[in-house]
Image (tube, rainbow, N blue to C red):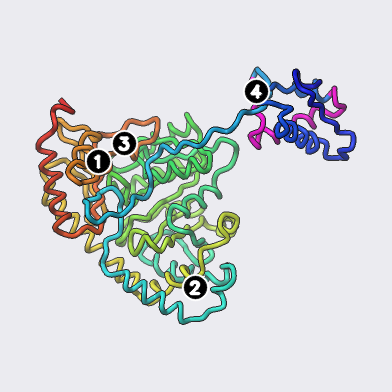
Amino acid sequence: MIVPDTKWQPDLRAAGRSKYKALAEAIREGILSGQLKAGAKLPPVRELAYQIGVTPGTVARAYNMMTDEGRLSAEVGRGTFVAGPKPAARITDVPLINAVNETIADFRSSRVPDVGQGLLIDDAMMFVAKSHRRRHINYPTQETDLEAREAIVEWLADVDAGKIDADHIVLANGAQNACIMSLLAILSGPSPVILTEDLAYPGVRHAARLLRAKVVGVEMDEHGIIPEALAAAYREHGGQVLVTAAEVHSPTTIKTPLARKQAIAEVVRSLNLTILDDDCHATVKSDVPSYRAILPKQTYYVSSLTKSVSGALRFGFAVAPLGQGAELRQVAQSAHYGVSQPITDICTRLITNGDATKVRLAVADAVAARVRQTVNKLGRWDIKWREDAPFVYLSMPHGWRASSFMVACEKRGVLVKPADEFALPDDRAPNAVRLAIGTCLSEPLFLSALDEINQLLGNPERRIDN
């Protein structure tokens, strides 16, 4: 018997040249048949190699293959064991999307305001429906999405992102998908590390979990990431990529100025990192160059139509670093073949006929108006705001904790998002909340909800926070 208390004995006499595959299959069959039970210890590599007449390398490769499949577990200093049943995954993170309920004041998700874009999208759908293009039958290709990529070059005319042409652009199903595609192109090795702001959009955590990467927070100040903190985080944890929202940071509304960007870029250059610049919240022309303009060979620029036109379209894109468009396109094809051709054509129509630009300007005006209303109602409190950011950042006054304030708001039919939902697992959260004001609430309900928030802020519940 090779394994105590079992009759399992691999026979590799007819295995041919791929003996490690045959041994792996024997282990797999032994587990499935019940001969190798969960927790059973397998022999050391050299011992099993001697007993069945193969090289130690053959046994090691088979053990590694079964460990990668999750059928074996290797414990340093103890040996190799049959793994037990995989526990059901526990999803404990906050959702990225909240259900829309127009009867309550929901300030949690940053949605694009309704400025009539629904009818324009319907018109674009009708236009595309009448085109009778044969390319709506087959898979999307680099040739069939060329019009869309050229339209995006036009869409980015107001963004200083360095040299961009259609070959640099890869389409995605929204900005989150574009971020994941870019990370797939960047990350490598068994334990990749993502560096990001110590307060970060929860989608970064979701992406890191999918990619089995560790996410490390980098300290910020009023100008964004602190360059010295980035270098220190890299020295302690390593890392391959810095994921940052430097134009409109969520939740704080911080915009990283040029001098700080240049200092961060110098650290990134010295450490040979890559930057993933998430610019999905921007709706107006920026006076600060993007990281891709500063580090064109080390930056992926990601954006979408979600916050400026419509979240329903799920149309995003990544601009690859110079010379890396083909590699990112290959990742996209491997991940999802391509973005739906009808959706691609609808979005192309919206951009090329000028409707998307009209919507973006109207959205920017609507957001600015809502920000002014919010500041008028809550201006006496400690809030951070910009007219071009679709949310405000509200620090709690004395007597309130963000978690308790969230509960108190919910009792009054108002939903807010505490800062701890943006904090990374090992970092402390500020005592603050984010209010996403781009919601499609009616004007009276929006203003009434701000009055409720203002009243609560001035009357802390001392029985909760003393």
Do the CB atoms of the residues marked 3 and 2 lie less than 8 Å apart?
A: no
- Reading the image, the residue beneath label 2 is 147
Residue 296 percent across, percent down from the top left: 48, 55
Bounds of the magenta span? Answer: 50-76
Looking at the rendered structure, the kind of residue marked 4 is Gly
Do the CB atoms of the residues marked 4 and 3 lie less than 8 Å apart?
A: no
Instruction: Tell me the element at label 2.
Output: helix
Residue 84 percent across, percent down from the top left: 61, 28
Horizontal side of residue 311 vs 134, given as left or right? left
Horizontal side of residue 371 vs 182, given as left or right? left
> What label does residue 27 carry, if any?
none
- Reading the image, the residue beneath label 4 is 39
Judging depth in this view, the residue of 348 and 13 nearest the camera is 13
- Reading the image, the residue beneath label 1 is 433
First of labels 4, 1 by sequence position: 4
**Corner quadrant of residue 216:** top left
Please state, as top left, top right, bottom left or bottom right, where the C terminus lies in the image.
top left
Distance (Cα) linking label 4 and label 3: 39 Å
Distance (Cα) linking label 4 and label 1: 47 Å
Dot 2 alpha-carbon crowd within 10 angstroms: few under 14, some 14 to 19, many 20 or more = some
Closer to the eye: label 3 or 2: 3
Residue 35 percent across, percent down from the top left: 74, 27
Instruction: Tell me the element at label 4.
Output: loop
The residue located at (40%, 36%) in the rendering is 217
